Image (tube, rainbow, N blue to C red):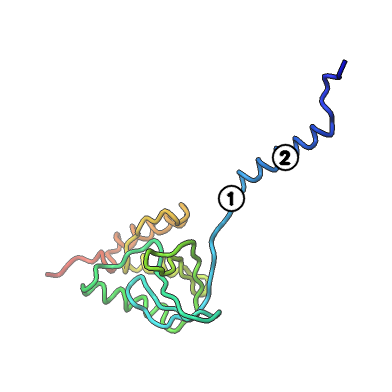
Amino acid sequence: MPSKNPNPTHLKRYAIALLFVFCLFNIKVNLAASLAGQVLAVETGNQISLSLTSGGQRRVQLIGITPPPPGTSMARISRRHLHMLLAGKFITVIYRTLTPRGNILGQVLHGGVDINLRMIEAGMARVYPEGRLSPGVLLQYHNAERSAQARKLGLWQKSTH
């Protein structure tokens, strides 16, 4: 009569396979990539042209922010502010995706400082709730927007008309 106790070798293989499957489904892979380069031009309050250190050029759109509507005086001020922060500087872009037009959609860092956040803090852009931003970063952006609004900075200034 065969033993009812399972073969220890089979149990070991089963346990290892089960552990592998468990790990496979519980690993959170960070699919973010980064690139570095020098800012060639500031196109709008949330878009720049970048000369990559690896060669070539790319357009980068700052993720999680939206500048004032094009053609307005605030749009020009927002663009100038971003220009002041980045013109000619070497930056790093952390990104996960491209825009429909093929531009890189990412978080721009200069000297370890989040430039997207700086634009919101100055009232030069609003938060654009982007699903690809981590909840912590999105919360930080919303807090900065509330602070800029409370201090009546940039977009949040009262009109004098």
Split into 4 quadrants, where in the image is the N terminus? top right
Give how far apart the Cα atoms at labels 2 and 1 are. 19 Å
Split into 4 quadrants, where in the image is the C terminus? bottom left
> Local crowd at mark 1 within 10 Å, few (<14), some, or many (≥20)?
few
Q: Of 34 and 103, which appears nearest the observer?
A: 103
Q: Amino acid at mark 2?
A: Ala
Figure label count? 2
Q: Of 121 and 64, which appears nearest the observer?
A: 64
Q: Nearer the viewer, mark 2 or mark 1?
A: 2
Residue tagged 1: 28
Q: Of 75 and 141, which appears nearest the observer?
A: 75
> SS of the residue at dot 1?
loop
Residue tagged 2: 17
* Residue at (52% x, 70% y) in the render: 112
Q: Position of residue 82 (x, y in %)?
A: 37, 75
Sequence order check, earlier mark of 2 and 1: 2
* Residue at (37% x, 64% y) in the render: 100
Q: Is residue 64 left or right of residue 19?
A: left
- The answer to whether 64 is drawn above or below residue 14 in the figure is below
Q: Is residue 69 left or right of residue 56?
A: left
Q: Amino acid at mark 1?
A: Lys
* Residue at (36% x, 65% y) in the render: 120
Q: Is residue 2 left or right of residue 56?
A: right
> SS of the residue at dot 2?
helix
Quarter of the rendering containing residue 106:
bottom left
- The answer to whether 88 is drawn above or below residue 129 in the figure is below
Q: Position of residue 92 (x, y in %)?
A: 51, 73
Q: Which mark is residue 154?
A: none
Quarter of the rendering containing residue 79:
bottom left
Q: Position of residue 126 (x, y in %)?
A: 32, 62
